[in-house]
Image (cartoon, rainbow, N blue to C red):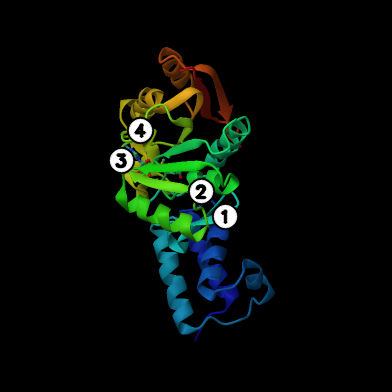
Amino acid sequence: MSISIEEALAAGASLQTVSDSWRLDVELLLAEVLGKSREHLYAWPSESLGTDQERNFRDLLDRRLAGEPVAYLLGRKAFWDFELQVDSRVLIPRPETECLVEQALQVGKAFSDASPRVADLGTGSGAIAIALARSNPLWLVTAVDISADALELARLNAAQLGAENIEFREGSWCDGLEADEYAMIVANPPYVAEGDRHLQQGDLPFEPAIALVASDSGLGDLSLIIQQSKLVLKKDAWLLLEHGFDQQDRLRTLLANEGFKNIVGHKDYANTDRLVVAQWPG
Ligand SMILES: C[S@@+](CC[C@H](N)C(=O)[O-])C[C@H]1O[C@@H](n2cnc3c(N)ncnc32)[C@H](O)[C@@H]1O
C-alpha cells in the first residue's frame, strides 16, 4: 500500500543522524519528487504517493543518508537572486560567497569606465561571474577555471540565466589573461589545507577536491593569484579574495609584501573573517 505525505515526512526522520537540517532536507526531497511546493506537504498530509514517487523518494533518502549533498540530489542551488544548476563537477556555491559579490558590486560603483574588464578566477558553477554580469550588463566579465567539466556547467548556467557578457576561458588563474587590462579580479579559490579534518565533513567529501584543497596550509592558490594578478590588473584596480576563517592576517601580510595598498578585511554573515579587498597601485 502506498504511503501518505505525512508518513513520508516521518520516514525522513532517519536523516537526523547525518544532517542538522534533516527536516528541511526531507521536505525539499519530497517536494521535488512530487513536483510540488513545500507548503503543499502541509496542506495535503494525507495525499498518497504514487509507486514511482515513493521509490524515487526512498532512493533520494538513501543517497542523503549516505551523505550526498541536497544540492546535488536536487541538481540546483539558490545563489544571489537566481538559481544555479549544480552537480558533482562543481563546488556548491556557499552563502558566504555572496559577501564577495556584495563587495565586488560596491567596489564597481566607483569604476569610471562604463565597460570595465572584470575576471572571476575559479568560476566553478559560474556563481560569482553570473551575479556580477547580470547586475552590470555592460561589464566585460572573464570567467576562468582549470576544470573543463566545471566550465561546461558554468556556460550552461550563464546561458540559462541570460548572462551574455561573460567570456569563459579554460586555464590556470591569470595565465592567458591580458596584461594591464582588468579593473577588478575576484576569486574564491581552493583554500582548505591538505588533510584538514573538515574535508571529511558535511558536503565536502562529495565536492571536487580541485575546488577545495590548496597547498601551503591552504594558502598556495591564494598566493599564486596575488602574485599573478599584479600583471593583469590596471593601475589602481582591485583584487577581492575569499579565504578561510583563519587566513586573513596571513593574506594581509602577503598582499602588503607584494605591494598592494588599501587592504581591508571583511567578515561574512556568520561574523567570520571571510574576504580581503586590496588595491593594486600599478
Ligand atoms: C572554491 S571553488 C569556487 C567556485 C565558485 N567560484 C564559487 O564560489 O562557488 C574553486 C574553483 O577553482 C577552480 N580551480 C582550482 N585550481 C584552479 C587553477 N589553478 N586555475 C583556475 N581555476 C582553478 C576549481 O575547479 C573550482 O571551480
Helix, strand or loop status at disc 3: loop
Q: CA distance from mark 1 to mark 3?
A: 26 Å
Above or below — where is 7 with respect to 224? Answer: below
> Which amino acid type corresponds to the residue marked 4 in the rendered image?
Cys
Asked whether the beta carbons under mark 2 and mark 1 sit within 8 Å of each other, the answer is: yes
Ligand 1 within 8 Å of disc 3? The answer is yes
Q: Residue at x 44, y 18 (%)?
A: 255
Which x, y percent locates residue 246?
Answer: 47, 26
Q: Answer yes or no: do the residues labelled 4 and 2 have beta carbons within 8 Å?
A: no
Is residue 51 visible from the viewing direction of this image? yes
Q: CA distance from mark 2 to mark 1?
A: 9 Å
Q: Residue at x 56, y 31 (%)?
A: 272
Q: Please, what is the three-letter code of the amino acid marked with disc 1?
A: Phe
**Mark 4 Cβ and ligand 1 under 8 Å apart:** no
Quarter of the image where one finds residue 153: bottom left
Residue marked by disc 1: 82
Q: Specify the amino acid type for callout 2.
A: Ile
